[in-house]
């Protein structure tokens, strides 16, 4: 997983071009949960800044952290000047400055599970908010989804990231909510889903797949072959299911 976490820099510009951004409703949901002004935030695994720019536009002083230098360089092209950028993994961060909000957008699964929540709590002010969001991006039509699965089968059994704690998909509470509920550091754990449907060209969808870590682990020749096969089974326009699952929790004021 550590290798996959650092595989995106090789396609940083492609990532920015083809990865969907986040809706404004995501920020609204986080700030409503916070219940008051949020002035400072720390982002974990900021990538090219697709979530960073949403929070920064609210006037929040965001510190965006990202372990990959190429991704961070791409981020700097797209975020407001007041965003502070730091090249660091979550595990590299040391207790010091505390923030009113710590969040991760499609990045928390790359962090080390050892002491994850005590580390997170150390970065938050008492009563501060933690937020995580993400979800699979795949064809909405089951027939198209199955055609894509069959086209990639010789190269990849799955292109998704399994639940880090093994929570089955039918469980009411999904990861990381499951871990947050067990943590002594956090309370008021909530899970919600932002329903989202996107429409994109077949070429755009293949461009998105070229930023998925499972494919980035393949050789260049294998990538070319599997993307060609997938492109052949896609309709010219693809409806995409891209629901965003949001987890929110509050750091205990006292422990």
Image (cartoon, rainbow, N blue to C red):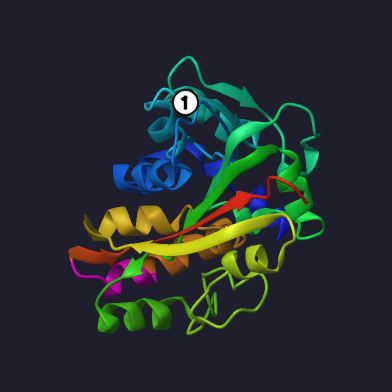
Residue 199 in which image quadrant: bottom left
Q: Is residue 223 above or below residue 68?
A: below
Which quadrant does the N terminus fall into? bottom right
Q: Can you see residue 105?
A: yes
Side (left or right) of 73 relative to 32: right
Question: Furthest-top residue in view?
Answer: 81
Q: How many marks?
A: 1
Residue denoted by label 1: 60
The percent position of residue 46, horizontal first and vertical second, equals 55, 39
Task: Assign the magenta stretch its main secondary structure.
Answer: helix
Q: Residue furthest front?
A: 254
Residue drawn at (62%, 58%), measured in percent from left and top? 187
**Quarter of the image where one finds residue 148:** bottom left
171 relative to 116 in the view: left or right:
left
User: Which residue occupies 38% across, 34% down?
Assistant: 54
Q: Nearer the viewer, residue 166 or 40?
A: 40
Residue at image coords 45%, 30%:
37
Q: How far across and how far down the image is residue 232, in percent?
A: 29, 71
Q: Which residues are magenta?
A: 229-235
Against 40, residue 30 (above or below) is below
- The image shows residue 194 at horizontal and vertical percentages of 33, 60
- Mark 1: few, some, or many residues within 10 Å (few <14, many ≥20)? many
Image spot of residue 114 (x, y percent): 82, 59
Report whether residue 67 is seen: no
Residue at (43, 27) in percent of width and height: 56
- Of residues 141 and 128, the one nearer the viewer is 128
Q: Is label 1 in a helix, a strand or a loop?
A: loop
Whether residue 234 appears in magenta in the rendering, the answer is yes
């Amino acid at each position: 997983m550590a290798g996959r976490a650092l595989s995106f820099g090789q396609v940083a510009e492609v990532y920015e071009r083809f990865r969907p951004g986040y809706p404004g409703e995501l920020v609204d949901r986080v700030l409503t949960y916070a219940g008051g002004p949020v002035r400072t935030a720390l982002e974990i695994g900021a990538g090219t800044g697709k979530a960073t720019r949403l929070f920064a536009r609210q006037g929040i002083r965001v510190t965006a952290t990202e372990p990959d230098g190429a991704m961070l360089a791409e981020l700097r092209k797209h975020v407001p000047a007041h965003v502070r950028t730091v090249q660091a993994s979550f595990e590299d961060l040391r207790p010091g400055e505390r923030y009113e909000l710590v969040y991760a957008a499609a990045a928390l699964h790359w962090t080390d599970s050892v002491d994850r929540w005590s580390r997170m709590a150390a970065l938050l002010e008492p009563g501060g908010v933690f937020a995580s969001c993400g979800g699979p991006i795949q064809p909405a039509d089951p027939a198209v989804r199955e055609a894509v699965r069959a086209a990639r089968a010789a190269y990849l059994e799955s292109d998704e990231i399994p639940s880090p704690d093994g929570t089955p998909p039918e469980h009411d509470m999904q990861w990381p909510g499951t871990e947050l509920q067990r943590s002594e550091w956090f309370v008021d754990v909530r899970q919600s889903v932002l329903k989202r449907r996107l429409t994109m060209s077949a070429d755009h969808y293949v461009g998105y797949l070229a930023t998925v870590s499972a494919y980035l682990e393949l050789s260049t020749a294998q990538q070319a072959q599997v993307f060609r096969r997938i492109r052949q089974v896609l309709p010219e326009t693809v409806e995409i299911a891209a629901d965003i699952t949001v987890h929110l929790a509050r750091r205990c004021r006292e422990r």
